Amino acid sequence: MSPVSVIIYVFSLLAGFTAIIIAVNLFKTYRRKYISQYLFFLIAYFISGFLNLIGRNLVNEFCRQNLIQRTMTDNLIVLLGFPFFVLTLFFFISFTRKMAEQDIPQLFMIWYFMACLAVLVALLWGIKIYISTGNNRFLKTLLSGINYLILTGLLLSLFKLWLRSRWIFNRSKQRGLRFLAILYIGLFSGFFVLFKLIPYNLDSVRYAIMVTFYFVLNFPPLFYFKKFLGRYFTSKSLQVEEKLYLASFFGHYHMSNQEGVVINLILEGRDNLSIAKKLSISEGTVKNHIYKIYKKVGINSRVKLIQQVRDHLSGHHS
């Protein structure tokens, strides 16, 4: 392996680890369910890539002269990495569903893991065929099919997020979720095309660059996601440490008890439909409360309301 490839690989692993650290900090700050799903996705994504990269390099180094031993060890690495591919896709689907304020149906989870178990059995069968006959055509076809299935699952979950965003009341938040979905669609599709175009050769600098793409792929969406959270949601410190100061904000603007509850839910990042379900009232009633809140504060958007709350709390701390 060339020194350039080694440097690229080390940089890639550091980049993947950095993405996880950023996601951990986001979860500590905002404490939202979908952020935890996104964090788990990044961890599974990193481990699957790490096993594939490090494992295959070790195989290439120690089994260079023995083709059969090298192929069998490659298959073992595939089996070790398969559970993490399963979790990567599952947590990403869960993340997009939570972002759209939907839960994953229990029936879907049952069918998903049953399908993954069936694929695992097929993998074992393909390895058995290869051991018995030396023919790996079935195994190669199966691995290619798994790649297509993973890409299809990722793209479908993103398309679902894009469609679901239409039902979110806040127009800016709609655009934010759609941009996040389109960004990920472009990156996942681009990586898949690159994966098909670049030949599998661990000694190739081009292959090392593709590995870099894999590990840095999540950075553009991650930084956009961070910006998105900072704009539409309050931090944990505002919800917990400064909760008592909200009473002064409510008193200053003469908010009713119900209006105070609605403001708290807005600060949690909920849209109108979610607030209505939480309070068991109609969406029209929620809109009426929000209209009165905006009128009392003298603003016209959620973003300005959150900023007004932050400014008021900052004034109390200064």
Image (cartoon, rainbow, N blue to C red):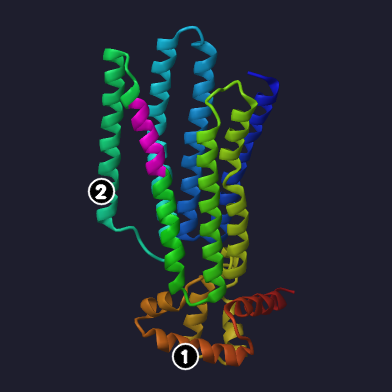
Residue 91 visible from this viewpoint? no
Instruction: Give the magenta range.
Output: 139-150
Q: In the current view of this chain or complex, which residue is farthest to the front? A: 197
Which quadrant of the structure image shows residue 142?
A: top left
Residue picked out by circle 2: 111
Residue type at tag 1: Asn
Name the magenta segment's main secondary structure. helix
Which quadrant of the structure image shows residue 183?
A: bottom right
Label 1 SS: helix
Which residue sits at x=50%, y=35%? 196
Label 2 SS: helix
In this view, the residue in front, 21 or 212, is 212
Q: Is residue 278 above or below residue 145?
A: below
Residue picked out by circle 1: 288
For the C terminus, give its image quadrant.
bottom right
Residue 112: % across, % down: 29, 47
The answer to the question of whether label 1 and label 2 lie on touching residues, with beta carbons closer than 8 A, is no
In this view, the residue in front, 54 or 172, is 172
Residue type at tag 2: Trp
